[in-house]
Amino acid sequence: MDDDARPAARLTVLSGPSGVGKDSVIELIRARSPWIKLSVSVTTRKMRDYETDGEHYHFATRQEFQRLIDGGQLLEWAEFAGNLYGTPRAQVEGWLSQGRPVLLKIDLQGARQVRATMPHAQLVFLAPPSVEELKRRLIGRGTEDEETIRRRLAHADEELSHEKEFDRTVVNDFVERAADELVGLLGSSFLTPAQAPEH
C-alpha cells in the first residue's frame, strides 16, 4: 500500500465506568508507549493532590470553560458530578494530521459526541472483571464523600449497560495486560514500536 492509500491516523476513545482503572492504564501507556499521543482534557473539577495541571488535566474555571464552548474549541464536552469536562479540538486534530495515533479518555456522553463528529474514531470500553470488583474499587479509594460515591455507582451501572455501543471491550483484570491490549488496538494499524518516533 502506498502512502496516499494508507489510512489516516485514527482517534481511539477509551471509556468505562468510574473506578475501572482508566487512569492506571493510561499512566502505563504513557510510560511504555511514548509514540501514542494522550489527549489531555479540560475540566472544572478541583485538582487532586497527585495531579499536575497540563499533565492529568487542564484545570479551568467554569467561565474559562464556557469561553472554550462558545469558541467551538472543544471536540466534545460533558457535565458529570457537577463538573465540566471537555477535549481541546486543535490538539487532537493536529496530532492526527501528523499521522500519530491519539488516545482520548472520556465518558459515554463524550464518546457519543466524538462518534457523531468523527465517525471513524475507534471506541473502546474498559470493563471491570466484575461489577462487584468495580464497586469495591469505587468505595475503597476514599477520594469522594458518600453522596458522590452514590452518584458514581449509579453512573457506573448506566455506563456498563451501554457497553454494546463500543467497537471493542478491554477487561481490566490486570493493568499491564489491559494496557498492552489497548496499545495493540491503537498502534498496530498505523505505528509499531519499530516505526515510531524516537522514544
Image (cartoon, rainbow, N blue to C red):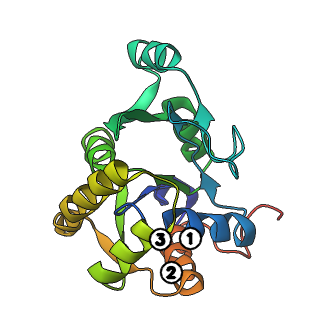
- Label 1's element? helix
Instruction: Tell which circle, 1 or 2, labels the residue nearer the N-terminal end.
Output: 1
- Label 2's element? helix
Q: CA distance from mark 3 to mark 2?
A: 21 Å
Asked if the residue at tag 2 contacts the one at tag 3, i.e. Cβ–Cβ closer than 8 Å, the answer is no
- The image quadrant of residue 165 is bottom left
Q: Amino acid at mark 2?
A: Ala
Residue 25, labelled with which disc?
1
Asked if the residue at tag 1 contacts the one at tag 3, i.e. Cβ–Cβ closer than 8 Å, the answer is no
Pinpoint residue 121: horizontal percent, then vertical percent: 36, 54
Q: Amino acid at mark 3?
A: Gly
Q: Which residue is mark 3?
A: 140
Pinpoint residue 138: horizontal percent, then vertical percent: 41, 66
Instruction: Tell which circle, 3 or 2, labels the residue nearer the N-terminal end.
Output: 3
Asked if the residue at tag 2 contacts the one at tag 1, i.e. Cβ–Cβ closer than 8 Å, the answer is yes
Residue 73 is left or right of residue 162, and the answer is right
> Which residue shows up at 36% across the image and 85% down it?
129
Q: Amino acid at mark 1?
A: Val
- Label 3's element? helix
- Of residues 2 and 52, the one nearer the viewer is 52
Q: Residue furthest front?
A: 146
Near mark 3 (Cα within 10 A), the count class, few <14, some 14-19 or many ≥20, is few
- Of residues 104 and 1, the one nearer the viewer is 104
Near mark 1 (Cα within 10 A), the count class, few <14, some 14-19 or many ≥20, is many
Q: CA distance from mark 3 to mark 1?
A: 18 Å
- Of residues 157 and 16, the one nearer the viewer is 157
Residue 55, labelled with which disc?
none
> Which residue shows up at 35% across the image and 63% down it?
16
